[in-house]
Amino acid sequence: MNGAESLVRTLVAGGVDVCFTNPGTSEMHFVAALDRVEGMRCVLGLFEGVVTGAADGYFRMKGKPASTLLHLGPGLANGLANLHNAKKAHSGIVNIVGQHATYHIGYNAPLTSDIEGLARPMSAWVRTSPDARSVAADGAAAIAAAKSAPPQIATLILPADTAWNEADGIAQVPESNQRISYSPQAVEKTARILHEDAAHTLLLVTGNALTEQALALAQQIAGKTGCTVMGQTFHPRMARGRGRFSINRIPYVIEQALPILKDFKHIVLVEANDPIAFFAYPNKPSMLKPEGCDVHRMTSWGENSVAALEALAGAVGAKPSDVKPQKLIELNKPTGALNLTSIAQAIACAIPENAIVVDESITTGRGFFPPTAASAPHDWLQNMGGSIGFSTPIATGAAVACPDRKVMCMVGDGSAMYTIQSLWTQAREGLDVVTIVFANKIYQILRGEFDGVGAGEPGKRAQDMLKLDRPTLDFVAMAKGMGVPGRAVTTADEFNKALEEAVREKGPRLIEVQF
């Protein structure tokens, strides 16, 4: 058994049985081992950003890490943007990155680079295997790091000779001694705050506090005490739809967020971060909480927020009977022209039971939350890191993780072009993904940001850097070239019909929404 095979067998034995891959010369022995060893599903991506994003989406839905296979430093560098998003989402991933043979590195061949230096900003655990007999143990340590609480990105660098030289065998992944819990003192403090001033207290939640069970507990607490429950602007995964507690999020736009938060005297963080602006703007605050508002942490990432909310409900005497009925928007299929309102209504009506919705709709989707609260129950995934080109890879990984669930991917035309190669992987694997591209022919968010930072009125050269025309992108043609059936729609009626057909049929589909 060589080092590569010892690593593949260790991965499979450790529960890592999917590899999103884009290999090169240095990884050929690992590729050969993947071919020999049963139990590992290999999914090829045509760009490393698809590979790393798919691993993120897989973890979000499966709750366990996948591996990636990347080619040397440049391959890792190509995947860093979506590893950044995965890091912000606290997704567990095991990256396997090839390296030149140990004796070849000193020659400074063209692809030689500082792979550890590239890996560290996005990885909590980084190691280069020194020899073939160390590879299996290093792989087991990488799996343990990826599965820790909170989950992490682990990057194992595999020099080519450590892959082809003789190894000892597989290694066992060490058992975690961590007991996922929470601070009873933090819960008691939160209960005191709610007893004293619930009307001016915000529970700001994310992460595991957005599961259906956790939201139900938060709804009981809000009903009993009168406190407000809100989410951050973006979340890794959120249970939504009819029968689930629908909460508002802090708006992205500072001018909208400030008045919503202005009356709170206490903000209790349940895995969430302090409410801050996404960017800095001249003469606008970075911190969105009002002056004098105290921030308290009840749980952090990696703690048991469901158990903490259960304890908090007990402390304040909250019960299911305390739940207040929610008023949801009535859903009706729109007709006529396509606009932000009709697009939102059409999508809300089309979301099927138990769907996975991946949202990178940027400006088009800012009004999607209210109507989709009345949709069939679903999970909603968002971009935690802000690096665009997130949604189509995430949808790919989510579909690999949950083949029995329809995945709906919503993306702007500018964002879609970053990782459009995802469509090829979806076609090759027969993944059940509906990709909805909002083709407004402009980086619309940047046009708004141009005004937001006070840069003045954009002239012709500035506008040319924001517009997506000359030529106009044809997503239906691109999808066809990658094996995905697609169609363009220009009216709400056409959009309704296209959504109905795409949801009904299995396999990947693309809808280009032109408005």
Image: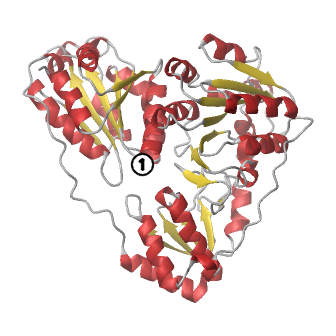
Vertical arrangement, residue 478 with respect to residue 208, above or below: above
Image x and y of residue 92, in percent: 37, 43
Picture quarter containing residue 226? Answer: bottom right
Answer left or right for 76 relative to 157.
right
Give 413 or 178, whichever is nearer the viewer. Answer: 178
Q: Is residue 16 above or below residue 507?
A: below
Residue positioned 24% across, 39% down in the render: 14
| Position of residue 258 measured from the top left corner of the image (x, y, whole percent) | 69, 64
Q: Nearer the viewer, residue 77 or 236?
A: 236
Query: Depth check: 290 or 181 in front?
Result: 181
Report x, y in % for residue 410.
66, 36
Q: Residue at x 39, y 19 (%)?
A: 22
Q: Position of residue 202 (x, y in %)?
A: 60, 72
Evaluate whether residue 425 shows in this view. Answer: yes
Work out which quarter of the rendered image holds the C terminus and state it: top right
Write down the residue under mark 1: 90
- Quadrant in the rendering for residue 93: top left
Q: Is residue 114 visible?
A: no
Q: In the rendered image of this protein, does residue 171 appear above or below residue 314?
A: above
In the displayed structure, 281 sits above or below 162; it is below
Left or right: residue 462 versus residue 98 is right
Q: Amino acid at mark 1?
A: His
Q: Which part of the image, by quadrant, shows the N terminus?
A: top left
Q: Nearer the viewer, residue 411 or 120?
A: 411
Residue 352 location, quadrant? top right
| Residue in the image at 75% along x and 20% along y | 487
456 with respect to 179 (left or right): right
Q: Secondary structure at mark 1?
A: loop
Residue extending farthest right: 336
